[in-house]
């Protein structure tokens, strides 16, 4: 798109990005809800096949079929009730058919998708970087909510994020390609070794493999320089949030708390302000 045209029509450009991001937010809600169901169905099918058990009835569900439906009553949602944000407000947060509450996650994901897209445009401008940044942001949103709700980080998303980071850095958009590759390996091995040692000392599993892959993906995007910032921020915010959650919900210290959402937040921090924070820190000390 011609840069001069964008400059002279900047409000229109931002408006188009906002509408497009809202539509993507609606798609992310589909992914957040359906992808874990698809993975569980595939896992169950493999287990039953291995154990030579009769196959379960085939209730086909994927990202495209069936059409959007209410999770409570399973009724198909008409298109007029499936407009991002507007439909939620129009229906007052309840299903038109069964009148059960619609999860607040649906409008929240759409709002986040829109706001972070607008922030990305403002921060990076209309450039090649923006394409990769938007993909990063939207995958991170999906990973955040899937792990928060299901304690699951699907390989299809974490590995896609890793490959996108490596592809982006073939053009050195965020760091050099050698740095991206070595940082991804270093990030994965660091968490893997730490958790293996933790298991040997406590006989407890402290973190899932999805966290290793997500951390590796962030290394592929931003390089080793930002890995300490990402891990420190995620660990600190995760620890504080976990303490408050356990006390408010009166849970025991053995209650599992997903680490992926905090890595996602740290990844967003690194995307927009990581270099600024590192520059401030290094200039303060040196």
Image (spheres, grey):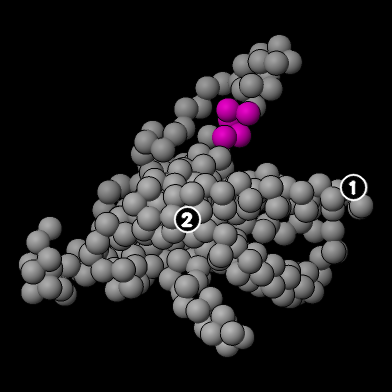
Q: Nearer the viewer, residue 24 or 277?
A: 277
Q: Nearer the viewer, residue 12 or 277?
A: 277
Which numbered circle lies on residue 200? 1
Left or right: residue 127 compared with residue 64: left
The residue at 53%/76% (across/down) is 278
Residue at the image point whose x is 31% and y is 59% from the top: 129
Give the number of the disc on residue 221: 2
Tell me residue 203's x, y (percent): 90, 47
- Which of the two residues, 55 or 158, is positioned nearer the viewer here? 158
Considering only vertical position in the picture, is 169 above or below 267?
Answer: above
Of labels 1 and 2, the one closer to you: 2
Query: Residue 101: percent from the left, percent from the top?
Result: 50, 60
Measuring 24% from the left and 61% from the top, which residue is drawn there? Answer: 127
119 and 226: which is toward the camera: 226
Q: How crowded is the residue under tag 2: few (<14 C-alpha within 10 Å), some, or many (20+)?
A: many
Using residue 145 as the reference point, say whether residue 232 is left or right of it: right
Residue 64: x %, y % from top left: 37, 36
Determine whether 10 is above or below 143 in the image: below
Mark 1 or 2 closer to N-term? Answer: 1
Residue 176 place in picture, x, y as percent: 43, 55
Please tell me in which quadrant of the rendered image residue 117 appears. bottom left
Span of residues in magenta = 39-43
Q: Is most of the magenta stretch helix, strand or loop?
A: helix
Quarter of the figure with the N terminus: bottom left
């Amino acid at each position: 798109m011609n840069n001069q045209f964008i400059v002279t029509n900047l409000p229109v450009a931002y408006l188009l990005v906002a509408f497009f991001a809202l539509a993507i937010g609606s798609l992310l809600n589909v992914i957040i809800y359906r992808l874990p169901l698809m993975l569980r169905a595939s896992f169950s099918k493999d287990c039953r096949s291995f154990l030579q058990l009769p196959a379960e009835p085939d209730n086909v569900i994927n990202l495209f079929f069936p059409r959007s439906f209410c999770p409570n009553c399973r009724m198909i949602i008409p298109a007029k009730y499936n407009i991002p944000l507007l439909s939620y407000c129009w229906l007052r947060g309840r299903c038109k058919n069964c009148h059960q509450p619609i999860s607040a996650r649906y409008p929240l994901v759409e709002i986040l998708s829109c706001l972070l897209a607008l922030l990305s445009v403002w921060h990076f401008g209309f450039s090649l970087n923006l394409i990769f940044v938007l993909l990063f942001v939207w995958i991170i949103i999906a990973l955040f909510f899937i792990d928060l709700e299901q304690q699951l980080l699907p390989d299809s998303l974490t590995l896609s994020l890793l490959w996108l980071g490596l592809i982006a850095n073939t053009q050195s958009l965020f760091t050099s390609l050698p740095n991206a590759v070595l940082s991804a390996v270093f990030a994965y091995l660091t968490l893997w070794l730490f958790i293996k040692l933790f298991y040997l000392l406590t006989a407890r599993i402290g973190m899932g493999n999805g966290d290793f892959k997500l951390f590796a993906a962030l290394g592929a995007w931003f390089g080793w320089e930002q890995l300490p910032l990402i891990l420190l921020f995620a660990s600190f915010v995760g620890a504080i949030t976990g303490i408050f959650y356990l006390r408010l919900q009166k849970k025991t210290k053995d209650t599992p708390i997903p680490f992926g959402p905090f890595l996602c937040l740290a990844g967003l921090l690194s995307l927009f302000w990581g270099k600024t924070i590192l520059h401030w820190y290094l200039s303060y000390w040196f």
